[in-house]
Image (spheres, helix red, strand yellow):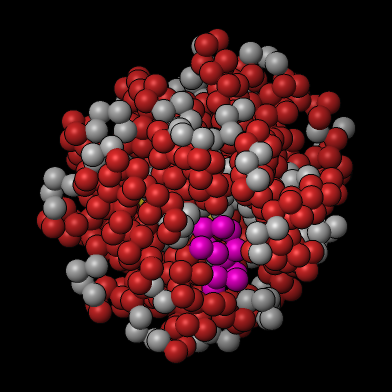
Amino acid sequence: MSETGYVKKDILREVRAAMQVGNFEAALSRAKHLLDLAPEHRELLYMAAASARYLKQTDAARDYLSRLKRVAPDFGRAFQEEGHLLRNTGDQAGALAAYRLATQYNPALVASWQRQAELYTALGQDRAAADARAQAARLEALPRELLAVTNYVHEGEVLHAEKIARAFMQKHPKHVEGMRLLADIGSRLGVHEDADFLLETAIELEPDNLQLRIDYIQVLRKRQKYEAALEQANVLMKRDPDSPVFQSLFAIESMQAGDYGAAIDTFDKVLEKLPDDASTLTSRGHALKTFGETDEAIASYRAAIAADPLQGDAWYALANLKTFRFEDDEIAEMERVAGDPNLSYMGRVHVAFALGKALEDRADYDAAFERYSEGNGLKKRQTRYTTEQMQEEFAAQEKHCTQDLFTRRAGAGHDDPAPIFIVGLPRAGSTLIEQILASHSQVDGTLELPNILSLAHRLRGRKQVSDRERYPRILHDLPDEELAALGRDYIENTAIHRQGAPFFTDKMPNNFRHIGLIQLILPNAKIIDARREPMACCFSGFKQLFAEGQEFSYSLEDIGHYYRGYVDLMGHWDRVLPEGRILRVQHEDVVGDLETQVRRILDYCGLPFEQACVDFHKTKRAVRTASSEQVRQPISASGLEQWRHFEPHLGPLKAALGDLIAG
């Protein structure tokens, strides 16, 4: 139960007030009563644990902390409180580990840095102690507002943090740390362009501030500006070529830029210094997997898990290979890890999805569905997605992108025919179509490029909440020369992903929502609608953990309604655009008669037939999507009916899809 339920903010203030005057008995009594009404309330559990510690009720404090860490796995103050408790009971090693986790989850916790410095000093680890003291001193030197911003950001109260940060920056417009924090908030809210601008400006003011460059790399990567991110990583490497942190960043950016050899070599250098670093072993596995070295990737992921069983990313990476099967002892270890109170929030998500896949492979479908549901439920708690808002977006496209608009603007846009957009829902067979096309000598296979989505975001402008229809309504007002410029910008900005072939793919599935925009700025681009039978497509999306951007996939109802909206909107594009403008490719048809569909796709794209497109699984190229291992094998019909194993659980999906389901 949240604060908006039984527990009001003024009642929480009563508990805090009792603690502040040292009346811990009253505070604990009040908190215990309220926890009967709201047993998963984060602040109440925290205050109960702290009050119990002050009252020397050690077992009760441990119990509250265990409950708190299950409710809020990444809550830094929970680990700080655990550090205090362990320190009081004489477990100095346990206290140090807890304080380290506290500052990992919330680096604004000054007390945890200070206690680490004391404990490291007692252990004779002077360098670590000095680093911890420096972090505490840096935080204490921050303006009070920015320390609060840092704390709120890492406790998940990002909107509140943004309000404080913007008020501070109005008074101090060139405060570099304020700019960095506001950029971090923007990045967390998905406003990556603003974050990019803020960090670029801050670096101009303080070019020697290394943290700014580290943050800038993260933002550039999110914007898929891989070349620019690699340039920034090179700057850091020149500063300190032996730094494992800078080496890791350089390796990751080399991988993103497509230089997998350099990435793997650099990861290996890091591992020479830190052979048991689970994050590096996991990242190295990602590079090997993308490059097609599956066996080596598996070995790297397993080494990461051996070094740290709580490395959820490595567990899920194994499951996400699709062709991998877990051993009995690995499943048992995952079950143990899933119950570990120190497992992070995303670790819980990763392990839930990995267990779902492992149990599905064992034909334990009911248990597998429980795990998939658990993982999706955790992810849904992190999103603000609503079906209603997405339906409004679909309706706005149909309202403003009319046949009259396209007739009036015929001849506008940039005439380059190079792009081949592959749109639809994730898990609908788009990676297979891309691999077929990328096997052609005249086509470069790229990525799920964010450029169209970024352009749509920019056209919405700052008033996207108060004026939700500004985009696509604005498409009526853009002059022809601006439409042409936007098309040229797309071609130029995506050039980094191409190898020189005359055509290239862009398989961002969500671009189906912006086909009107594509038509206006790139009227000669090809558009392929990758479609799959609705139950199979939707359930495949539900059991897939996407990196980002597919928030509709975290509930059966949401994904069913999204599929309906997609079908309706594609029907609209068919009606308002010239006949044959979009090629619809049914995944089941590709599986059933590969060569016929390959010829059909190539004919639509104006490309001559090449046998390599039929033999797509032999093509050596980096593939970054969830289907990367599947498209390296001959085509198979084995996955078409997998959803039927879970049919008893899929009533909400069927209800959402309605008459789209045959029979």
Residue 36 appears left or right of 434: right
Residue 495 placement: quadrant = bottom left
Q: Residue at x 55, y 26 (%)?
A: 337
Residue 129 appears left or right of 169: left
Relative to 454, say whether 28 is above or below: above
Residue 136 location (% of width, % of height): 36, 60
Q: Residue furthest top?
A: 328
Dominant secondary structure of the residues highlighted in magenta in the image: helix
Q: Residue at x 70, y 58 (%)?
A: 23
Residue 36 location (% of width, % of height): 84, 45
Q: Is residue 660 visible?
A: no
Residue 535 location (% of width, % of height): 74, 35
Q: Which quadrant is home to the C terminus?
A: top right
Which of these two is toward me, 383 or 544?
Answer: 383
Relative to 306, say whether 220 is above or below: below
Is residue 370 part of the magenta span, yes or no? no
Residue 599 appears left or right of 263: right
Residue 168 location (% of width, % of height): 47, 82
Residue 4 placement: quadrant = bottom right
Which of these two is toward me, 31 or 24?
Answer: 24
Magenta stretch in the rendered image: 151-162
Q: Residue at x 65, y 20 (%)?
A: 360
Is residue 159 part of the magenta span, yes or no? yes
Q: Residue at x 24, y 62 (%)?
A: 210
Residue 454 appears left or right of 1: left
Which of these two is toward me, 397 or 141?
Answer: 141
Residue 372 placement: quadrant = top right
Total number of numbered discs in the rendering = 0
Relative to 631, say whether 20 is above or below: below
Q: Is residue 359 visible?
A: yes
